[in-house]
Amino acid sequence: MSPVPYITKWSAEEAPALRVVAKGRGIGYADERPYDRDSNGVLWTRVPALPGKGRPEFGRVHALRQQRAIRELLCQVCGRPADRDSDGVLWLLGEDPGDPGFWTTDLNTTHPPLCMPCAVKSVRSCPHLRERYVPLRARAFELAGVRGAFYRPGYPAPVATEVTEVAFGDPRIHWLRAGQLIMRLREFRITSLESYTA
Ligand SMILES: [Zn+2]
């Protein structure tokens, strides 16, 4: 059985139903605490950290561990430092390099990087990744924004309308309850895992 990835959410880690209110230039929690916002003032989903409790919810991501892995370049599977060499940090993305758009723009992703053993194991065990994974080495990258629940003003309380991505610097970010951090890969090249899979 494959290990449960570091960023996967466990069933005991359910976010409490917090009352969202209009606050300042956007939204906040009725009983907001200082650690509900990051250093950019972005409001985050408040989730308990109970990894290993209950059952893993594959496909769902724990907001704080995702954020930490992207920010600190930790492997999304094991939580140890991601692989880095002179060509950059290792990412494994399910994008299609045959798509011309892939090469013309920066690449935004909510997926944290990986260490080499976990990258190799992932493409071996996941059929989807095996068919369409692209191992990348990123040399230049930056935190670009957040993904989460977007609210519009409402009475008696703001109303969540959609899940969307908002860039840092965009004033709409004050209306977002963030769940994941977005990394923009600016300079990257395709690499190979073959020498490790032999
Ligand atoms: Zn790893």
Image: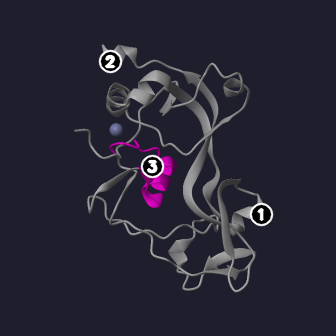
Question: Which numbered tag is attached to residue 197?
Answer: 2
**Residue 78 at x, y percent in the picture:** 32, 43
Gap in angstroms between the C-alphas marked 1 and 2: 45 Å
Q: Are marks 1 and 2 in contact (CB under 8 Å)?
A: no
In depth, the one of 85 and 150 nearer the eye is: 150
Question: Which numbered tag is attached to residue 107?
Answer: none
Which kind of residue does numbered mark 3 sit on?
Answer: Ala
Q: Disc 3 marks which residue?
A: 69
In depth, the one of 162 and 118 nearer the eye is: 162
Marks 1 and 3, the one that precedes in the sequence: 3
- Residue 118 in which image quadrant: top left
Asked whether mark 2 and ligand 1 are closer than 8 Å, the reply comes as no
Note whether 178 is above or below 87 in the view shown.
below
Q: Disc 1 marks which residue?
A: 171
- Disc nearest the viewer among 2 and 3: 2
**Residue 169 at x, y percent in the picture:** 75, 57
